[in-house]
Image (tube, rainbow, N blue to C red):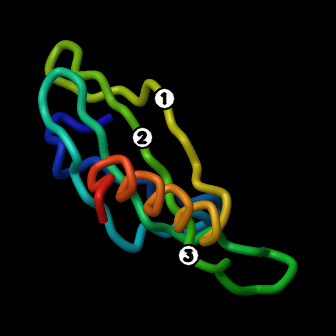
Amino acid sequence: MSNSVEDITINYEEDGILVVKELDKEILSKGAWTTILFRYQNWDKAKGQYSADMYSIRRYQKRQGEYFAKSKFNISSNEQAKKIISTLQNWLNPES
């Protein structure tokens, strides 16, 4: 695991292939509990190419100077991401 929140990644390599490729991340909160939103792609072995962009919100707990993954929520599609955005915008700006 990482001892710096900036070093946390979801890149994952298997048999020399980067099967989870992190494209971007946004650190939403820092501290003993850290929340990060990732944009990533999965390697599709059958197609020989990466998937469309995917998103994941992950929580990490810092213990003894290192961050450990504790939970995650994968956003299953662009449509679901848009619904989450729309709902949050409505909740945060009810008069808009």
Task: Classify 27 as above or below 71.
Answer: below
Taking depth in this image into account, of 72 and 75 the one nearest to the observer is 75
Disc 3 packing (10 Å; few <14; some 14–19; many ≥20): some
Where's the C terminus, which quadrant? bottom left
Where's the N terminus, which quadrant? top left
**Earlier sequence position, callout 2 versus callout 1:** 2
Q: Which mark is residue 71?
A: 1
Task: Classify 37 as above or below 53.
Answer: above
Taking depth in this image into account, of 3 and 61 the one nearest to the observer is 61
Question: Picture quarter containing residue 43?
Answer: bottom right
Specify the farthest residue to the front.
95
Q: How many marks?
A: 3
Horizontal and vertical percent position of residue 39: 44, 66
Residue type indicated by callout 1: Ser
Horizontal and vertical percent position of residue 94: 32, 52
**Earlier sequence position, callout 3 versus callout 2:** 3
Q: Are marks 2 and 1 in contact (CB under 8 Å)?
A: yes
Residue type indicated by callout 3: Asp
Taking depth in this image into account, of 81 and 71 the one nearest to the observer is 81
Q: Which mark is residue 53?
A: 3
Element assignment for label 1: strand
Horizontal and vertical percent position of residue 48: 76, 86
Q: Residue at x 64, y 69 (%)?
A: 79
Residue that mark 2 sits on: 58
Task: Classify 46 as above or below 6.
Answer: below
